[in-house]
Image: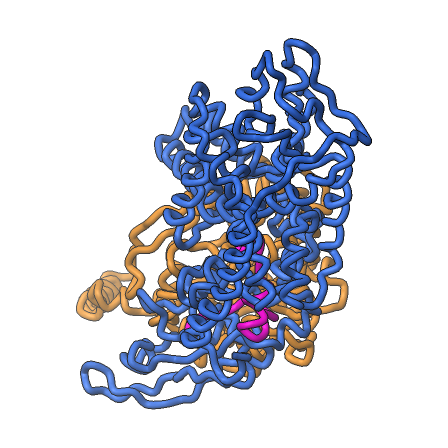
Chain colours: A blue, B orange
C-alpha cells in the first residue's frame, strides 16, 4: 500500500519534473529525456505501426511495459499512470465519501470498443489515439491550460506585490525569484483554446464523482490495451470467485475487478494491482500467486460490438479524412519545421503537446478545426504569438513519434514552413510613406529574405516621400514568422506567413 | 600726465564706453552664438588583444576610476540582442564586455549588472553571444548577468523630445549610479548604422517595433533620457552587410579597434567612417546633434590613442 502510493507519487512527480525540464536551459540539446513516458506507451507504438509510418525506435521501450503486464497484470494503471494518480488525488480532495454508481462497470466495454475503433482508424492513417491516450491527455491539459494558468496567477501575484513595494517585496521578491528558478516558465506562456481543454480535463476528473476511476474503467484506451494483455498475466489474484460469507473487497475495489454478482470471476483485465483487497481482507483469504490454473473469466465483448467498433473506426477514417482532404490546409496553417506532407503529419502526430510546451517563443499552438476534424490538437505555428526560433530545433527533440523529425540545424534552417507575404494595404511604408523595416531588421536568414527598394509614396499631405519599401524574396524566406511577430502594425500583422508553393501540401 | 592729456583720455574712454554700450549684443543674440564647449575627446585603441584595447582606450580617457567610484552600482548594457555566436559580429564581443566589467570591479564598484532587452529569446542570446559565460567567468559575485524584468519598466516624459515625448525605460538603469554603454558597429537598413545611440533601444521597454516609424528622431529623443557615463564602441569586428542580424562570416570585417568616449554623437560620428560614410549620412546622428547631445563635426573631435 505504502509502496504503491510511493510509486504513484514517484512517477507522478517524475512526469511533472520532465514536463518542467521540457524548456530551453542554455543547451541546444535538452539534458533530460523529457518524452520518457511516451516512449513507454504501447498504444503509441501500436498506432505508429498501424499507420505504417517509419518506425520510431524509441517507442520500442514500451515493449518493456507490455512484458511486465504479461507478468504482473495491469499494474501500470495503479502504480505508474500519472493520470490515474491525478484522478486518485482529485477524488481524495473532492469526492471522498461518494459511493459508486456502478455506471463504470456497465460501460466497461466502451474502452475496448474505443481502442478497437482507434486502432482500426489508425490502419487507415487516421491517428486519433493521442486524443484519448491518458499520457497525451494529461500532458496536453497541463501544457495548454493548467501550467499557463498557474504561471499567470503567480506572475500577477508577484506583480501586484511588486507594485505595493516595500516592505511586502522583502518577502515576495525572494519567493518570486525562487519560483522563477524552479517551477515558473521563463516568460508567461499562453495557449489558444484553454477553456475547451480545461472542459475536457474537468470532464475526465468529474467522472470520479460517478464512479471511482471511471475514466480508467470505462474509457481509457491504453487501459484497455493493458487489460487485454493482463488477462494472460502470470500473477493471479485468488480467490477467483467471490466468497459466500463476505463481500468486503467488492466495495473496496476501485476498479470493480473483484468477483461479484455481476462479475463471474476476478477480472484480471481490470485489476490494477493496488493490493487494497490483500491488505484489508478480514479473513486473510486474498493472495496473489504464480502459476494458478484457476479458470480465467471470459472477456465478453460481444462479437457484434467488436465488429461494430472496428467497422466504425474503419468507416470513420475516410469520413474524417474526407473532411480534412476537402478542406485542404488553410493558408495560415503553418506546421512545425519538418512536418512534411499534411496527411503524413496528421498520421504521425499524437497530440501530446510536448512541442507546444518546449517551443521557446510560445509560437506552437493547438489547432482546433483549422486542419479538419482529425487535426484537433495538432500543433501549428501562430507567428503573432511566437515565431520559429532560427537556431532552435527543440520541438523535434521532444516529439515522441517523429511527426516533427529530427533534422540537422542547417536542414531545418532551409526548410520553409511557409512564405511571408506583405499586405501593402496595411504596411506603414506603403500606406503612409514613412520608414519602418522592422520585418527586414529581424529576418534571420543570410542574405535576408526581406529586402527593400527605394520607392516613392505619397503621404496624406500629398507629398511624395522616398521610402524603403520592404519586399519578400520568396526563395530565401523560410516562413519562420519573426517578421509577422515583430510587425508594429496593430491587430493582424502587415506581413504574414502563409502556406505557399514552397510548402508541401 | 597733465590735465590736457587726462581730459583727452577721459573723453576717449567715454566715446569707447558709449560705443561699447551701443555695440553690446542683445541677450538673445548672445544665446544664438555657438557655445564654446571643449571639443569632445575620444580614445581609440588598435590591436588584436581585445581586452587590452578596452583597457588602453579607457586609460587614455583617464582610467575607469574617473567614471566609476568605489561603492557605486553600475549597469553595463552591451548589445547582446541576437542569437548569433561572437564571430558573426551581431553582438558585442564577450572579451570586451568582460574587460569593462573587470575594470568596474577594480574601480571598486559595489555591483555590476550586465543586461540587455534582447530581440531574440534572451536565454539564447545571453548564452550564444558568449557574454554570460564571459562575465560569469570573472567569478566575482559583484558582477551579475541579469535578464530584464518586465515589471521594472517605468514610463517617463522625455523633456525636449521632438517626437518620442513619452516612453518606458528600465528602472535599474535610471537608478544606477553609473551606466556604461557598449555597442557594436553594424549596418541596419532603417537606421543605416547601429552604433552607440541606437544601442539604447535595449534599455527601453514597450513595443519597440512602433519606434521604427520615425526611427531616427526617436533614437535621438531616447538619448535625452539615457545618458551613459561612458560609451564604448566595439569595432574589433564590424558587420558590414545583412545587419543587424548578420549570419555569414563574409559580412564581417575585422577592424581591431575599440573606441571609448563620453560623447555619443562624436563616437557615432567617428563610427560612420568605419563604414566609409559621413556623420551627416545618418539621420539620428544629425538629430542628436540638433538636440545638443554632442558634437558631430569630425574636425572638432579630438582623438587620442592609436
Q: In the rendered view, would you say A255 is above or below B213?
A: above
In-front residue for pair B49/B118:
B118
A343 part of magenta stretch = yes
The boundaries of the magenta stretch are A331-360
Main SS of residues in magenta: loop
Residue B11 placement: quadrant: bottom left
- View extreme (top): residue: A282
Q: Position of residue B220 (x, y in %)?
A: 39, 65
In-front residue for pair A165/A194:
A194
Q: Quadrant of the N terminus of chain A?
A: top right
Residue at 30% from the left image edge and 56% from the top image edge: B166
Residue at 58% from the left image edge and 43% from the top image edge: A300
Q: Position of residue B206 (x, y in %)?
A: 38, 55
In-front residue for pair A402/B148:
A402
Residue at 59% from the left image edge and 12% from the top image edge: A245
Q: Position of residue A182 (x, y in %)?
A: 58, 37
Q: Exactly how many numbered labels are in the figure?
A: 0
Residue A106 seen in the current view:
yes
Q: In the rendered view, would you say A322 is above or below A259?
A: below
A368 part of magenta stretch = no
Residue A202 placement: quadrant: top left
Q: Position of residue A3 (x, y in %)?
A: 70, 23
In-front residue for pair B76/A84:
A84
Amino acid at each position: 500500500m505504502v509502496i504503491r502510493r510511493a510509486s504513484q507519487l514517484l512517477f507522478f512527480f517524475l512526469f511533472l519534473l520532465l514536463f518542467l525540464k521540457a524548456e530551453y536551459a542554455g543547451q541546444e540539446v535538452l539534458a533530460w529525456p523529457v518524452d520518457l513516458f511516451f516512449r513507454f506507451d504501447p498504444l503509441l507504438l501500436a498506432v505508429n505501426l498501424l499507420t505504417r509510418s517509419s518506425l520510431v525506435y524509441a517507442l520500442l521501450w514500451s515493449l518493456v511495459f507490455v512484458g511486465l503486464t504479461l507478468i504482473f497484470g495491469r499494474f501500470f494503471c495503479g502504480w505508474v499512470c500519472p493520470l490515474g494518480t491525478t484522478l486518485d488525488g482529485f477524488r481524495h480532495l473532492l469526492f471522498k465519501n461518494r459511493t459508486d454508481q456502478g455506471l463504470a462497470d456497465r460501460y466497461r466495454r466502451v474502452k475496448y470498443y474505443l481502442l478497437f475503433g482507434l486502432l482500426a482508424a489508425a490502419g487507415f492513417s487516421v491517428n486519433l489515439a493521442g486524443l484519448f491516450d491518458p499520457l497525451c491527455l494529461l500532458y496536453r491539459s497541463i501544457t495548454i491550460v493548467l501550467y499557463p494558468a498557474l504561471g499567470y496567477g503567480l506572475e500577477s501575484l508577484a506583480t501586484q506585490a511588486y507594485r505595493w513595494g516595500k516592505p511586502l517585496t522583502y518577502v515576495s521578491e525572494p519567493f518570486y525569484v525562487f519560483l522563477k528558478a524552479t517551477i515558473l516558465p521563463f516568460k508567461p506562456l499562453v495557449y489558444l483554446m484553454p477553456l475547451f481543454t480545461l472542459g475536457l480535463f474537468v470532464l475526465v476528473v468529474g467522472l470520479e464523482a460517478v464512479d471511482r476511476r471511471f475514466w480508467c474503467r470505462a474509457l481509457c484506451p491504453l487501459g484497455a490495451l493493458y487489460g487485454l494483455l493482463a488477462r494472460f498475466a502470470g500473477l493471479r489474484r485468488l480467490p477467483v470467485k467471490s466468497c459466500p460469507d463476505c463481500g468486503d473487497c467488492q466495495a473496496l475495489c476501485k476498479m470493480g475487478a473483484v468477483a461479484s454478482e455481476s462479475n463471474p470471476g476476478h477480472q484480471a483485465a481490470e485489476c490494477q494491482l493496488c493490493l487494497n483487497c490483500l491488505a484489508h481482507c478480514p479473513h486473510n483469504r486474498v493472495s496473489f500467486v504464480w502459476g494458478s490454473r484457476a479458470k480465467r473469466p471470459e472477456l465478453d465483448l460481444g462479437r457484434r460490438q467488436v465488429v461494430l467498433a472496428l467497422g466504425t473506426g474503419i468507416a470513420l477514417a475516410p469520413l474524417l479524412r474526407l473532411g480534412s482532404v476537402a478542406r485542404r490546409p488553410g493558408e495560415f496553417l503553418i506546421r512545425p519545421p519538418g512536418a512534411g506532407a499534411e496527411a503524413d503529419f496528421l498520421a504521425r502526430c499524437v497530440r501530446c503537446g510536448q512541442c507546444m510546451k518546449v517551443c521557446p517563443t510560445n509560437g506552437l499552438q493547438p489547432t482546433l478545426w483549422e486542419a479538419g476534424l482529425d487535426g484537433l490538437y495538432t500543433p501549428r505555428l501562430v507567428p503573432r504569438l511566437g515565431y520559429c526560433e532560427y537556431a532552435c530545433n527543440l520541438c523535434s527533440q521532444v516529439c515522441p513519434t517523429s511527426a516533427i523529425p529530427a533534422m540537422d540545424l542547417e536542414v531545418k534552417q532551409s526548410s520553409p514552413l511557409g512564405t511571408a507575404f506583405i499586405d501593402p494595404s496595411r504596411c506603414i511604408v506603403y500606406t503612409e510613406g514613412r520608414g519602418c523595416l522592422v520585418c527586414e531588421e529581424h529576418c534571420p536568414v543570410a542574405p535576408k529574405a526581406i529586402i527593400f527598394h527605394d520607392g516613392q509614396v505619397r503621404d496624406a499631405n500629398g507629398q511624395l516621400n522616398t521610402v524603403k519599401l520592404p519586399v519578400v524574396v520568396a526563395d530565401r524566406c523560410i516562413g519562420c514568422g519573426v517578421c509577422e511577430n515583430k510587425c508594429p502594425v496593430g491587430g493582424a500583422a502587415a506581413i504574414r506567413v502563409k502556406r505557399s508553393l514552397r510548402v508541401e501540401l | 600726465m597733465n590735465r590736457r592729456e587726462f581730459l583727452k583720455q577721459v573723453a576717449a574712454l567715454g566715446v569707447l564706453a558709449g560705443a561699447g554700450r551701443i555695440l553690446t549684443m542683445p541677450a538673445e543674440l548672445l544665446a544664438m552664438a555657438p557655445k564654446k564647449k571643449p571639443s569632445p575627446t575620444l580614445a581609440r585603441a588598435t590591436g588584436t588583444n581585445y581586452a587590452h584595447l578596452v583597457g588602453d582606450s579607457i586609460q587614455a580617457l583617464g582610467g575607469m576610476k574617473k567614471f566609476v567610484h568605489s561603492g557605486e552600482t553600475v549597469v553595463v548594457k552591451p548589445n547582446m540582442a541576437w542569437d548569433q555566436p561572437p564571430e558573426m559580429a551581431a553582438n558585442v564581443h564577450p572579451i570586451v564586455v568582460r574587460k569593462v566589467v573587470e575594470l568596474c570591479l577594480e574601480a571598486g564598484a559595489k555591483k555590476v549588472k550586465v543586461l540587455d532587452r534582447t530581440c531574440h529569446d534572451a536565454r539564447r542570446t545571453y548564452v550564444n553571444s558568449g557574454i554570460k559565460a564571459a562575465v560569469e567567468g570573472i567569478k566575482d559575485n559583484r558582477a551579475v548577468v541579469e535578464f530584464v524584468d518586465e515589471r521594472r519598466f517605468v514610463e517617463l516624459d522625455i523633456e525636449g523630445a521632438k517626437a518620442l515625448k513619452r516612453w518606458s525605460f528600465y528602472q535599474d538603469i535610471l537608478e544606477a549610479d553609473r551606466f556604461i554603454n557598449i555597442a557594436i558597429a553594424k549596418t541596419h537598413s532603417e537606421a543605416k548604422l547601429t552604433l552607440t545611440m541606437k544601442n539604447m533601444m535595449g534599455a527601453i521597454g514597450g513595443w519597440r517595433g512602433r519606434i521604427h516609424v520615425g526611427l531616427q528622431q526617436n533614437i535621438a529623443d531616447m538619448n535625452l533620457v539615457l545618458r551613459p557615463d561612458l560609451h564604448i564602441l566595439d569595432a574589433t569586428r564590424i558587420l558590414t552587410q545583412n545587419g543587424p542580424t548578420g549570419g555569414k562570416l563574409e559580412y564581417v570585417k575585422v577592424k581591431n579597434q575599440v573606441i571609448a568616449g563620453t560623447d555619443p554623437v562624436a563616437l557615432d560620428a567617428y563610427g560612420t567612417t568605419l563604414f566609409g560614410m559621413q556623420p551627416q549620412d545618418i539621420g539620428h546622428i544629425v538629430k542628436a546633434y540638433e538636440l545638443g547631445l554632442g558634437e558631430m563635426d569630425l574636425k572638432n573631435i579630438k582623438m587620442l590613442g592609436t
